[in-house]
Each structure stands twice: as C-alpha cells, then as structure tokens.
Amino acid sequence: MKVLDTIALILVIIGAVNWGLIGFFQYDLVAALFGFMSGISRIVYALVGIAGLYSISFFAKGKVMD
C-alpha cells in the first residue's frame, strides 16, 4: 500500500470514529482535543474530508477491467 493510501485510510478511520462518538454519545473528540472550530480542528476536519474524497479511488483500484 502506498504511503498516501495509508495516511488517507488513517484519516478516514479517525473521521469515522469521531462521527461514531458524535452519533452515539454526542461527543466530538476533535473539538474536545483542539477546541470547537479552532484553526487546528478545522484543519483536521478538512484533512479528513480530503482523505474521504481520495478514498473513493480505492474502489477503482480494486476492480479488474475486462
């Protein structure tokens, strides 16, 4: 797995865990760690979003073209 793929996967997992905590416990881990909509938390949210978009390409990589 390429380094970029690994980083994207880690960021997507962080985002998924954060959304799970929000959904189940109404607890935003990123906001708790870095402050509500602080500069750092906005960067984290943006990186997770970009990683999610990049991860869409994983579907194309897994398919064999006939």
Image: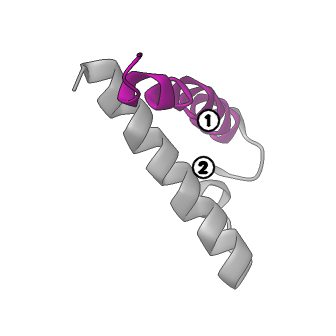
For the question of whether residue 63 can be seen, the reply is: yes
Is the magenta region chiefly helix, strand or loop?
A: helix
Screen quadrant of the N terminus: top left
Mark 1 vs 2, N-terminal side:
2
Magenta region, residue range: 40-66
Q: Residues within 10 Å of mark 2 (few under 14, many from 20)?
A: some
Locate residue 8, reporting x and y percent: 43, 31
Residues tagged 1 and 2 counted as in contact (Cβ below 8 A)? yes
In this image, 47 relative to 22: left or right?
left
Query: Mark 1 — residue?
Result: 40
Screen quadrant of the C terminus: top left
SS class of the residue under badge 2? helix
Locate residue 48, reporting x and y percent: 58, 37
Pick whichever, 43 or 17, lies toward us.
Answer: 17
Q: Is residue 43 above or below residue 28?
A: above
Q: Is residue 13 above or below residue 17?
A: above
Residue 10 disc label: none
Q: What is the distance, in whole Å, between disc 1 and disc 2 at their CAs? A: 6 Å
For the question of whether residue 33 can be seen, the reply is: no
Q: Residue furthest front?
A: 66
Location of residue 23 by image quarter: bottom right
Residue 34 disc label: 2
SS class of the residue under badge 1? helix
Locate residue 32, reporting x and y percent: 62, 62
Three-letter residue code for mark 2: Phe
